[in-house]
Image (spheres, coloured by chain):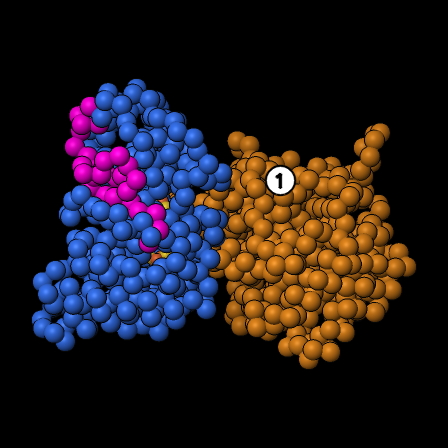
Amino acid sequence: MLRYLIVLLDDTSTSFCHYTASNKEPNLISLDILRKAIRWAMTENLTIQFVYPSHELLDEWNETIETIDHVKIKPATAASTSDADVVVFEGLEAIDMPLSKRDVSIVIRTRMSDFLDKHDRLHKLLAQANRLNVVFTDVDSFADDDQKAYDEALASLSLVVKNEYVNNHPVQFNLLTDRIMLTEMNNCGAGDSTITLAPDGQFYVCPAFYYDADGYPVGNIEGRLDIPNKQLYRLQYAPICRRCDAYQCHRCIWLNRKTTLEVNTPSHEQCVVAHIERNASRRLLEAIRQEGEFMSGTEIEEIDYLDPFEIARP
Amino acid sequence: MSEESTKIKESEGTWQDGIAKTITFIVTKDCQLACKYCYLVGKNEQERMSWDIAKRAIDYIFDHESDFPEKSVIFDFIGGEPFLEIDLIDRICDYIKVELYKRQHHWFDSYRFSFSTNGINYHTDKVQAFIKKNASHLSIGITIDGTERKHNLNRIWKGEGPERGSYIDVVRNIPLWLEQFPGAGTKVTISSADIPYIKESVLHLYSLGIHEVNINVVFEDVWQDGDDALFEDQLMRLADAIIDGGYYESFACSFFNENIGKPLDPERENRNWCGAGKMLAIDSAGNFYPCTRFAAYSLRSKRPIIIGNVYDGIDKNKLRPFLTLDRLTQSPQKCIDCEVASGCAWCQGENYDAALSPTVYQRSTAICLMHKARVHANNYYWNRLFRKLELEGKREDFEKNKIDVKPEIC
Ligand code: SF4
Ligand code: SF4
Ligand code: SF4
């Protein structure tokens, strides 16, 4: 069921996820489209997430945005991030910037190789932040040879996270704690629970489908939302994912489409990355439990595969 | 017909069905004919496979033996008309045989070369020399649509001027073909305009000595109002003719199959129908496809699905959707609940071509009414035949000897 509407306020709105918001010049959404989006969200009972560019918006736009309850996703480079709910940093270097508010969610977009080299830089942030999301911009080129290094990086970060938990700071870190907290799939929901409206007035399954040359619109704000083969965005229609228990995985619909040509089928790389995280979460849960009672009733089974394709083939 | 015989002829099926890998070389996109129903929308005379591409494809496949674990292999050559490229094919087959031997490959002595031809060049010296050289590893199907009238409706020579049918150019080669391949069958494809000729066509093929007729309706949405009723009527007439004429003893027609027209269990019978993705097709540019139907020249409205090429190999991610496809995930609810679902086929390529979005996960049901009509006629056929056999005291014998038929769809 549709629950969220992502509104890209400008063509240069920050990416907050795996995709790159590429090759676009500043192009602000029109006031007319913005107002229609807000009205539509109200009639459909949707929560709006506004995605901001670095540059300031005009007063009229800011005032219109405030006519609806919403979430603000802003780049760390925005003139002001004090009112943001989610702040997005580009790369691990950028996180030294001061943050005006501690209870904001932090998203760090990074290449896998940078993460493997520089994950130590996250230690300080893990001690301060309440919610930290690391999003890889190149999951699709993850090599089987990188598995060990990723596993080791997560093991090293697990020590930090464990200490935070033991010291009563239960930081949420998507790569290590989401799987512990979840009891069912919690994927990105593009095309199913979430839909995106771009400055061109058209709906897209997710912002990536707006920026990618291979993307396609699924209706527009003047007409209606029309997602062909809508069922394929739902978990039950994903033969590999529906058998999987890497609940924290984004199950990125755009990466699916890009790598396998089908929105419901993930690549080997996406699955392996998510399973290394799943298994690291399992070990973290065990480690925290050595220090005292924690999340009783939650168990993460030991499994012998990193790619559920192996168990999903009919 | 012998009065004693109760052994019913069943379709031979495909060699090593289900355990053989099919590797298809699209050697040319050219053909002498311009059949009116041909699905190859992009036929042309320029795109011929080079030896370099063919060799690279074979080398890639043999260098990656563990990615092709199937016990056997069928090397399939298609076109256009494959025998237009007999020199290349001969070279490819020689190379395959030598490499299988040199590499002690697990397909050594478990391979076939397979051809679907329009039959026009069948008698030529080059084709005959090739057949003699590879006789024990060959299967060749010649396409003939039925009576002269029916065949010439669609299967006409290419070129300017008045239409010229190809029947006599093909039929003259049938005796030689049947002498060399006595069990050979033919494939017939039925479109809307062909329905009135089904009965006479099948009987005509039997009269030419062809014992196995594999016959399918096209998957494309070509059907007109009332076609299903006409189709049912033709099949009932054919059923009567086969039973009354005793043809069932030694001739087979894939339209009639005991296993079709039953509900399917959602758990146990959830397999995909079509073999796309388990096969591999290679075109003249060296691109790999999950099946030839995904190459640009066979698609009406979608981009080709290319899963790799002879230089970079197969992108296994692109195979994952095909290898995890099941019946329920791609079928609309009416098919999941359908009382006559078994035997209702689909073609993944046509599903993709007809889908509302670029996906192989939307099953096209353009043949729905045609399948239901076939089920009615099929029920009639078996009820009549079994009753006849019972009255003759031959039913039990039949049940003992019967073989399950797996219909061919492509
Ligand atoms: S499909 Fe979902 S996970 Fe993938 S880029 Fe879009 S929003 Fe992110
Ligand atoms: S790990 Fe793979 S199978 Fe599991 S949810 Fe993620 S993409 Fe789907
Ligand atoms: S297409 Fe029609 S006949 Fe075939 S399974 Fe679906 S509902 Fe049944």
Crowd tier of the residue under label 1, counting other residues whose Cα lies within 10 Å: few below 14, some 14–19, many 20 or above: some
| Image position of A71 with respect to B21: above or below | above
Residue appearing at x 14%, y 64% in the figure: A165
Residue type at mark 1: give it. Ser
Residue B44 horizontal side relative to residue B357, left or right: right
Note whether residue A147 is visible. Answer: yes
Looking at the rendering, the stretch of residues picked out in magenta corresponds to A63-92
Q: Tell me where residue B67 sits by quadrant.
A: bottom right
Q: Residue furthest right?
A: B125
Note whether residue B116 is visible. Answer: no
Residue appearing at x 34%, y 69% in the figure: A151
Q: Tell me where residue A230 sits by quadrant.
A: top left
| Image position of B343 with respect to A198: above or below | below
Given the image, what chain letter belongs to the residue carrying mark 1?
B
Which residue is at the front of the view, B230 or B38?
B38
**Chain A shade in the render:** blue
Q: Tell me where residue A168 sits by quadrant.
A: bottom left
Residue A260 highlighted magenta (yes or no): no
**Chain B shade in the render:** orange
Which residue is at the front of the view, A293 or B253?
A293
Residue appearing at x 66%, y 70% in the figure: B62
| Residue A13 image offset from top left, x and y in percent | 34, 35
